[in-house]
Image: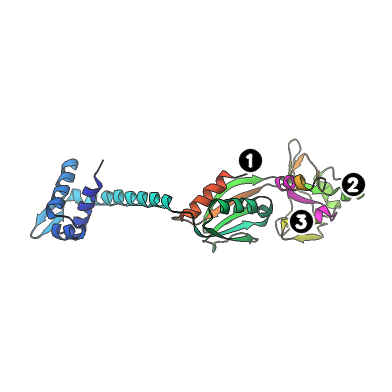
Amino acid sequence: MFDLKELEAFVSVMKSQSLTESARMLDLPKSTMSRRIRQLESELGQALLRRESNKLIPTEAGKLFLHYAQEILDLAGNGRSALDELKQDVSGKLVVNCHDALLRPWFGPLMLEFMNTFPGLEVSLKTQIAPPGLEQKDGLCLWLGKEPETGMNCEHIGTLHQSVYASPAYLQQHEPPAHPSDLACHRWIGLGSEEQDGVEFWHLNEGRSKPSLANSRLKVDRLFMKVDAIVNGGGLGLLPDWSVSRRESHHPGGLVKCLPEWQGPSQGIYLLYPHGSLTRRAQVFLTYIRQSLPQEWLG
């Protein structure tokens, strides 16, 4: 294992080409600098420097070893910085964007728990409506849907499965669908542009089906508006099973699953964060999120 002080002396002399100048910059006696370089050369079994006139010139071995010596020093410096950050309080401002479907039933309460754990933290929480784009490179984001093309790290952390739901009142007035093809006869409530190309369903025995949803009279851009429209008898629509389960635990009987043996398209859940070094508060937040994921997302 190389001595970091010996590597530091060698790299400094390689840059200055002067033992005297390097000793001055490192605030060390010239004799100490010389001894450290001799010890490094002894460990390597090769001369790294040779004297020419009043300068120290690198040998071929010295030129080759310089790159590795600098990498070792950089790695050690990064390690020290990382350990120093662990000593720091988790404080300052944290900017987080979250898809609205995750905000009310899970992320909102979780964010309050996180802030109570770290009282020095200031959070700016925003609803993410449109998919993050290539221009979005800052802050942290929780997204639900297709994997976005973005200029950030995109980590898949879970999946939500979807089914068709209706209200009991709607099903009392309309014949429940027995097959996805029957959905063409029902009022369909859509969400944004996600279903403009149709919806594909899957059955264990019957395979895939992609029915017509021509009777889509209402399209909304927020999940809670879609839920409200379905609960109030506006028609049928796709909803995440997990979201319905959370709602039913507080408001039982408002939604009924239709076509229970048919699985709708799944939605991915993604954690987005910038490339490169992250602040201590961002690192702790990401770890907190990963450790708090609902078990249903991971199945």
Residue at 68% across, 54% down: 104
State the CA–CA distance, disc 2 to disc 1: 35 Å
C-alpha distance separating marks 3 and 1: 25 Å
Quick one: SS at disc 3? helix
Q: Earlier in the sequence, mark 2 or mark 1?
A: 2
Amino acid at the residue labelled 2 = Glu
Find residue 113 and report its horizontal and vertical position in percent. Answer: 60, 50
Query: Is 200 placed above or below 221 here?
Result: above
Magenta-colored stretch includes residue 68: no
View extreme (right): residue:
173
Q: Which residue is mark 3?
A: 226
Three-letter code, disc 3:
Lys
Residue at numbered disc 1 = 295
Q: Seen in the image, is 75 located left or right of residue 230?
A: left
Specify the segment rendered in magenta.
229-246
- What residue is drawn where x is 50% and y is 50%? 284
In the displayed orientation, state which residue is furthest to the top.
205
Q: Nearer the viewer, mark 2 or mark 3?
A: 3
**Circles 2 and 1: CB atoms closer than 8 Å:** no
Task: Tell me the SS state at disc 1.
Answer: helix
Dot 1 crowding, Cα within 10 Å, few <14, some 14–19, many 20+: few
Within-10-Å neighbours for mark 2: few <14, some 14–19, many 20+: few
Q: Is residue 239 magenta?
A: yes
What residue does disc 2 label? Answer: 175
**Upstream in sequence: badge 2 or badge 3:** 2
Q: Position of residue 262 (x, y in %)?
A: 76, 41
Mark 2 or 1: in front is 1
